Amino acid sequence: MVIRNPGRAAGTARARAGNLVAALLAALGLVLLPLPAGVSSARADSGTTTETGSAVTKSGTKGTYDDFSGLKVTVEQTEHLRGQGVKVTWTGGAPTIPAGTTPLLGNFLQIMQCWGNSPDGPDPDQCEFGENPAYSVTQTSTRTVGGGFPDPLEPTERTIPFRPVRGDTVTDPTTYFTPLTTNEMDYAPTGADGAGADVFDVESAVDADYMGCGSVAKSGDTPEPCWLVVVPRGTHEPDGTVPSLGLRSSALSASNWAQRIVFRLGFDPIGSYCPIGQKEVETIGSEMASEALTAWQPTLCTEDKITFGYEQQSEDFARTQVTAPTDGSPMMAFVESPVTPAEGGSPIVHAPLALSGLVIAYNIETPDSTRQIPRLRLNARLLAKMLTTSYQYDLPGPTSQFARGDLNPKNPTSLITDPEFLALNPGFTHTVRQYEDIAVPQTSADYIATLWRWLRSDPDARNFLAGKPDPWGMTINPSALKELTPATNTTINSFPRTDPTKWVPVAEAPNFSIDSVGTNPYTNGLHDSAVRVATHAQPGYTGVLGQTTTGYTFTTNGYNGPGDAFNLGVTDAATAARYRLGTAELLNSDGQFVAPTVNSLTTAANAMKQGSTPGVLDQNPGLKTSGAYPLTTITYGAAPTGLDATTRADYAKLIRYAVGDGQQTGVGPGLLPPGYAPLTTSLREQALAAATALVKGVSPSQAAGDSDSGGSGGPDAAGGFDSSAASGGTGGAVAPSASVQPTATATATASPTASAAAGGGGSGGSGTGNAASSQGTTSGVLLGAVRWVLLTVLAVGLAGSVGGPLLIRAGMIGAGRPAAGARPWGRSTG
């Protein structure tokens, strides 16, 4: 599958160009996806390593001054990796001593990624560490050892060079990674219970060519492995001193390095699954299908001997490629809303291929911890407020200026000060150093139209969008009110930022102004939004840094530090799963807060009615359906019947695989990734009928899609889950009037399964995680933040490389780029 993403820039690897993200991922303490059948959690006795599946648990050892022998660290996935998030949990640690106490800041973990294939693990010069990540709270991220950092094993002061897998060894690692691009975690705190959890940003060779993880020299070679290294820190320096100003010695210093716990990381190969010169057939359209198409690609290439190219584009543009093609146009579009044939054009078949959902992903850490809050609830009106830049901080201005622009002075400064948000999330006491509103892509899309349709279907949100105040007196931004007035815009499929407010931080530089897009820049797509949330990036402009030889430069929020993350973003369930993000429970039309699960997505699909186009369901998020997730989406593959017979047959092969073996859930090539629900039986039958019609070059049979209802029951056994779960609702949906008690963060243990059970409240609103609870919680696979492994790494050729499938092509770049030198938030899809 040649993946072409217009939100990615072609060019060099992330390290040298600084145009791909790698930073510490904020911890996501609640994990929602059960282990696949037949795979149990890793367990370890003291001093032993037990590997089951690819989760690995290892124990620490006793040091000269600090005892880490009770520490057990679990890495949830150590095989079939790509660029993704990997959860690291630990138990048996000493509680972190917070800053401001004596001794200052002790008992924490430092985590890094290293390269090398020695069975003994990496050497310090092979590790991405020592660049003091942005907003670090320690003084220990350095490559200098000895001297002023006393260590009996380091007699003289020296700087440990960085040795890349290819390239020059350097004493200044900024040649390869910087404080704004490093993925090292120099501070992962341990809670009062001795446990902790964090998500590490694993880099493949696509993200960091200087480590080469997963790279192969030639086809058939074993991909290069890498290492995850955990260095526990206590309260003593290597010479036994307890510094009053906090630890300063490096994790790479010999005595500290001797306490390391290492985990070998196996990557799938970075290269071409599809032979160069093999037949290529192009497709185009919705990003909602991206993760599934990427997972299916290896099998399609090897079994059907066809390289199916995929160009991510807006559905409106994709539809024009099908109905008004030019030479070389892709003739299958992935859409959520139907393709209408051009006048006199051939009929269009619509084959349902993927069932998923648009989600509000979140990364909100508990204060002074890297563990994530266990649940987040949002209703349509809160989303409407965020999407219309109606909070004071959504607009630019000095900290002391309220109200900003033409906003109502009664409007809160931000979501976390909104009494409606606090009422839905009682017990929420989180404060953040910097706040930035929800991350949204700069594009038009069918899934965005579904989101706005949901907002307008909700009476409270609809009234707010029409200009009526909420119960606390907050009103919509006047510029958004004008933009959304039905008389001027009855259908909206984008996220407009029309507020004219500009702030000139320096009077003598009137051309250096900040607007609402600069305050909260757009992202380049759903994947980009997820990465921004995962890395708790805050790229919005906050003022002017100062004057340089070329003029003034803007300052940005940057990145919130450990325990301070508060990020929201619009993305899809599969990408949220890939990066281990939490997903908000949304209030559906039946008065229930529902998370995106296999059960809730299937329930929504079963309730959908036939739309105006035969074979395409009306994805109405306002239907009153118990247990349905409101932003459920069905992505269709649409192609005209007037194509030549060979092309029709090729597209039919894609359809048949996607709705056949491609609906088997799991992790690996050819499987349906976490974040998707298997298609219902009727949807699969409809897709197969569409494939048959396409091969014959005729209109699809009306029997495949002319029913008044999309109800189908659960998928059959081949679909990969128990059909009895299809009608069970959300598993504990709670009416909005009910008292919402915050679920305690799941205690991290060596068994991720136990952790999920303890934190089940985020899965469907039950707050219990008990499959047999009286509230009806089912065992459906949960899609919010994946607890098991993510997708198998797929080949992503670097731009300009020869013939590698999974190329990333330069294209449209979102407005509001970061200031020069600021860390970008985009990352490759490989």
Image (spheres, helix red, strand yellow):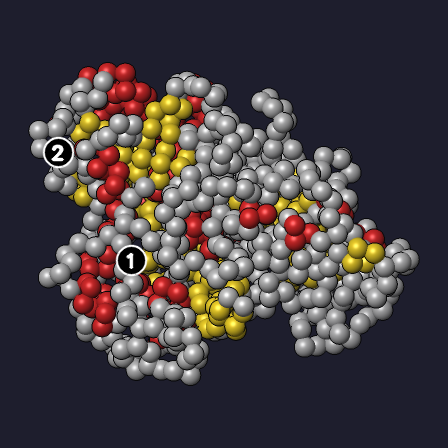
Question: In what quadrant of the picture does the N terminus appear?
Answer: top left
In the rendered structure, the answer to whether residue 539 lies left or right of residue 329 reads: right
Q: Nearer the viewer, residue 137 or 5?
A: 5
Q: What residue do we see at 23% from left, 69% from top?
A: 479
Q: Determine the image quadrant of residue 642.
A: top left
Q: Secondary structure at mark 1?
A: loop
Whole-angstrom CA distance, mark 1 to mark 2, is 28 Å
Residue at image coords 35%, 68%: 515
Going from N to C along the chain, the mark reached first, 1 or 2, is: 2
Q: In this orientation, which residue lies closer to the viewer: 475 or 761? A: 475
Residue 71 percent coordinates (x, y):
72, 54
| Up/down of 541 relative to 31, above or below | below
Residues marked 1 and 2 touching at CB (< 8 Å): no
Q: Position of residue 528 (x, y in %)?
A: 43, 50
Numbered badge on residue 495 = 1
User: Of all residues shown, which one is farthest toward the left?
Assistant: 344
Instruction: Using the image, tell me which numbered label, if any, was put on residue 302.
Output: none
Q: Please tell me which residue is depicted at 44% across the width and 67% down the height of the picture.
A: 541
The local secondary structure at tag 2 comes to loop
Can see residue 518?
yes
Give the residue type at disc 2: Ala
Q: Where on the picture, by quarter, is residue 117?
A: top right
* Foreground of the two, 102 or 217: 217
Q: Position of residue 378 (x, y in %)?
A: 34, 63
Q: Which residue is mark 2?
A: 342
* Residue type highlighted by circle 1: Phe
The answer to whether 105 appears left or right of 531 in the picture is right
- Using the image, determine if residue 387 lies above or below residue 166: below
- Tag 1: Cα neighbours inside 10 Å, few (<14), some, or many (≥20)? some
Indicate left or right for 823 with 193 as reference: left
The residue sitting at 31% across, 73% down in the picture is: 501
